[in-house]
Image (cartoon, rainbow, N blue to C red):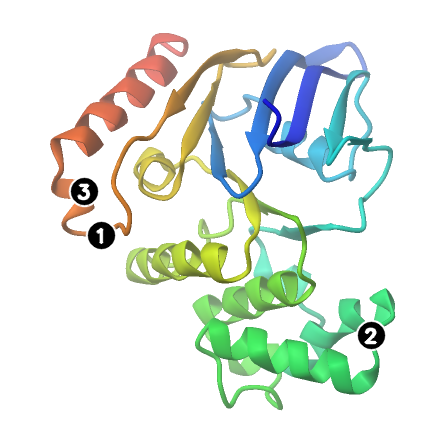
Amino acid sequence: MSDTLVSVEHLTKFYGDHLAVDGVTFGVRTGEMVSIVGPSGAGKTTALRIVAGLLEPTSGSVTIGGVRVTGPPPDVAVVFQDYSRSLLPWLTVLGNVTLPLRAKGLSRTAARTAALDALAAVGLDGTARRRPRELSGGMQQRVAIARALAYRPKLLVMDEPFASVDAQTRMDLEDLILPLRQEYAVTIMLVTHDIDEAVYLSDRIVVLSPAPSTVLRVIDVDLPLPRSQTATKELPGFARLRHEVLDLVRARTD
């Protein structure tokens, strides 16, 4: 694919004698959102961390924009599941969002402007001077998302970002990501255990087998945009895709 941003080729990862990922290959096109699903222990997070340059593969390769990943790339941002650990509690909300921007070389004024714009985009106007502990879990994860987007990455990597919040907040955050993806023109890779979430958010879904992980199938999500928590999930196509993914995951775990 000429518009491929991320290319994962024959990715293999051993932990000691344990083979976790076995020859995983897939691509992610510029501007799309791709979810990675599979049973627990299927190597989803391992593959994602290798893409983000946080973990070295045993063999195989990842390239982003044609450049081989050998460490954390400068144009990749990561949102983790545990927002309580990803935010620095002694910094204000604004300080947390501007920290990577200042490290990137932006002036104090430019970093502040970008951070405030990102906080406004995630619905957190008026929180700049607050500390993370003063915010709800969902609000803290919005700060983490704002920090990632303010960085203006080409690729946003999200590892179970909504798993630690309640169901309503989860839906709110899902609906937040969809327009932000367009506004910030960012490509997104998402690891999730939630098949409904993968179908709702994605352009394509990579289904992994139980460990040692291989790619069972890459499924195109042909649902119309914009998407709605009610209308989209009532479509026959949503149910069809959900069953297709669920059947693949269950067939390899039964």
Residue drawn 33% across the image and 21% down it: 245
User: Which SS class for mark 3?
Assistant: helix
According to the picture, the residue beneath numbered tag 2 turns out to be 106
Measured from the top left, where is residue 153 in percent x and y? 68, 54
Query: Dot 2 surroundings within 10 Å: few (below 14), some, or many (20 or more)?
Result: some
Q: Is residue 5 left or right of residue 217?
A: right
Mark 3 touching mark 1, by CB under 8 A?
yes
Residue drawn 84% across the image and 81% down it: 107
Measured from the top left, where is residue 177 in percent x and y? 44, 56
The answer to whether 224 is drawn above or below residue 204 in the figure is: below
Q: Earlier in the sequence, mark 2 or mark 1?
A: 2
Residue drawn 77% across the image and 87% down it: 109
According to the picture, the residue beneath numbered tag 1 turns out to be 229
- Quadrant location of the C terminus in the rendered image: top left
Q: Nearer the viewer, mark 2 or mark 1?
A: 2
Q: Earlier in the sequence, mark 2 or mark 3?
A: 2
Amino acid type indicated by mark 2: Leu
Identify which residue, 243 or 39, lies in the foreground: 243
Question: Which label number is shown at residue 233?
Answer: 3
The answer to whether 67 is drawn above or below residue 252 in the figure is: below
Q: Is residue 103 left or right of residue 2?
A: right
* Picture quadrant where residue 98 is located: bottom right
Look at the image and tell me whether residue 62 can be seen.
yes
Q: Is residue 102 left or right of residue 179?
A: right
Label 2 and label 3: CA atoms lie apart by: 42 Å
Amino acid type indicated by mark 3: Lys
Q: Check the image and name the residue furthest to the front.
A: 2
Measured from the top left, where is residue 106 in percent x and y? 82, 74
* Picture quadrant where residue 151 is located: bottom right
Label 2 and label 1: CA atoms lie apart by: 38 Å
Amino acid type indicated by mark 1: Gln
